[in-house]
Structures are given as C-alpha cells and as structure tokens.
Amino acid sequence: MLVQNKEDNALLDEIIMTLIKHYRMERTMEEYLEYDELLMILCGIAMGTVARFVTLKVDARQNPSFPSGYFISIIMGIIASALGAVAIPALFAKDYTAVTFLTLAIQHFREIRKTEMESLQELEKTEYTIRGAAYIDGIAKTFESRYYFSLLTSFLVVLTLKIMSLDNIILNIMVSTIVGTIIIYLLSKFTKGKTIGDICNLAEGVITIDGSDLLVDGMFVSNALGSTSDQELFLNEGVAIVIEPKNEKFRITLENLGQRQAMLFEATRTFGIKKYSFAKRSFKEGKIIITFVPILRQPYDIINVIKTTPVLENSRKIHTIMENDIGGNQNG
C-alpha cells in the first residue's frame, strides 16, 4: 500500500507540474482566461459535478460508503469535471500540449480502480458472505467509469457553449443546464446495465426438511442440517427465494458462479445471517435457490434486493443481455 501511495503521489506531482508549465504566472495578461471562457468552464464543472451526484444514487447500493466515500467521490468528480472543462479552451487556443495532462488524469483514474479492487478484496474477510471476484471487478470498473462520466459531460457542455458563443449569462446557464441534462440522461441510459429482476422471476419458496436434507419447493439444497436444533432454526426462521429465468437461454447467465455469489451477497449484506447460507442451482428445474437464516426476516424485501442485483459483465453470455434495452423484457 505504501508503494501504491508513492506511485499516486508521483502521478499527482506530474499532473501539477504539467499544469504549472502551461499556466505559469509569467504569462501575459492576454493569455489569461477571458470572462466568457471562465463562465463556460464553471458551467461545465457544475454539470459534470451534477453528473457525479446522479451516479452516486446508483452506486450507493454497491459503493462508495456514506459519508466519507461520498465526499471523496464528489471531490474526484469535481476534479474530473474541471479536466474536461478546461480542455476545450486549450484546444481552441491551439495550446495542444496543455491537453496532454488528460492522459495523466486517465491513468490516475485507472489507479483508483486498482485501489478500489484491492480495498474490496480486503473487506471480503469482514462480510457475511463474499462478493466474489466477478462482482468486485464489476464494482471497480463502474467506480472508474463514473469519473469519465463527469469528464465527458463537462467536456461536451463547454464545447456546446463555445460553438454557440452566447454573450448573455442567463442564456449560457440555461443552455448548459439543458445540454448537460440531455447528456447525463443519454450517458445514464447507455451505461445502465440489466438487473436480475429484468431477466428473472422471483418468488418465496417453501422450506421442508427430509431427514438431514434441506429442500425448497421439493428441490434439494443441502444435507448439512444434521442436528434437530438446526432443522428447527431453518424451518422457523429461514428464508428461501426461488429464482427462475424468464427465458431458457438466461440460465447461462443465472447459473454463473459469480452471478449466484453476487445475489447471495446482496441478500445477506442487507439482512444479515444468523446461520447458514446457500446459493444452489437445480439442474432439472433450471432454477436458482437462495436460502439462509437472516437476522431480519423480511422475505418480500429480500426478493426486491435480489431483483436489483446487477447482471455482471462476465456472466453476460447472451447478446440480447449485452444490449442496453432499459427495463428489459423476457427476450432480454
């Protein structure tokens, strides 16, 4: 971790030195930002930051944590927005070398993804059940992409204002708000993936015990319940959720080990575990069974949590799932 911090500090130093090189104090007054350019940059930064706020609502279920993680994400969102906003004036001023620091920023965002992955992997030891490598990879990539979201939003807002060259402050603010809102909507729609609720039907299953075997709707789950106390615990307090794909081909995604682990993690992290947790598949029925003894027994809410579990990128083997048809249908 110490080596990682040194690398991050060196990268930040390099960014700062590049900025100083191209915007040093010895420049003449003609080279400073004009009022119109400053207004455009501020509008771009504002809309890029709004974009980060919007995506924070989406990220809250997975990451970051509140409130420290929120604060860090907002600050990094502002920085990403500033980088996107200042690029346009630099390009129009034909100061192409000033844009090179964007590549350093992108490299830094990639380092953030790497750090996020390492952090989540360390936290695996403290969770009720593990997220799994596939889920962690997806969260880290999403975490990185949100900064590009802010950067691109501010970049396009400033580009639009530069092309239109409006003199009125109110018109600039109105245009930036409208254009920024459209960009945020389009990018949100493009980047939003499917969830388990889009491709599966979920229902509460009936738990039964046959000897030491745990069954849900007659489907075998485990034979680990040997003691009478464990059997009574599961019968009285256990919850079982049966997940059935809306289309036979979605079994390829649903039965992926990483996808099953992600569903189990979301359910147990939200409602806790007293004892036992299983994520089993029924080859004959083509269904997935999530069952455990929760601290908070709320079957309806557990179903809703599992429904919102994202379909992981590495489990999207079907072309129709890869397409971003928001809301989903039984064909993907």
Image (tube, helix red, strand yellow):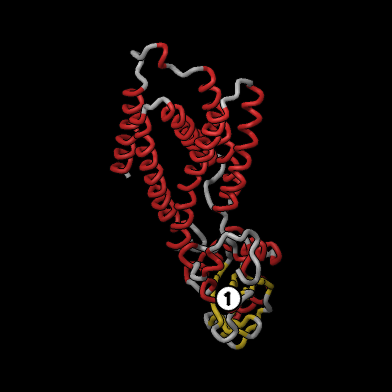
**Viewer-proximal residue among 35 and 204:** 35
Residue 122 drawn at (x, y percent): 41, 54
Residue 293 drawn at (x, y percent): 61, 69
Considering the image in quadrants, where does the N terminus appear?
Answer: top left
**Image quadrant of residue 332?**
bottom right
Depicted 123 relative to depicted 205: above or below: above
Residue 201 vs residue 109: left or right? Answer: right
**Viewer-proximal residue among 130 and 140:** 140
Query: Can residue 158 be seen at all in this image of the molecule?
Result: yes
Depicted 89 relative to depicted 216: above or below: above
| Total numbered labels placed on residues in the image | 1
Residue 97 vs residue 211: left or right? Answer: left
Residue 122 vs residue 238: left or right? Answer: left
**Viewer-proximal residue among 275 and 148:** 148
The kind of residue tagged 1 is Ile
Which residue occupies 63% across, 31% down? 175
Q: Residues within 10 Å of mark 1 (few under 14, many from 20)?
A: many
Depicted 138 relative to depicted 203: above or below: above
Name the secondary structure under disc 1.
strand
Query: Can residue 271 be seen at all in this image of the molecule?
Result: no
Which residue occupies 53% across, 39% down? 153
Mark 1 lies on residue = 288
Residue 118 drawn at (x, y percent): 39, 52
**Viewer-proximal residue among 323 and 53:** 323
Which residue occupies 41% across, 52% down? 117
Which residue occupies 57% across, 84% down? 220
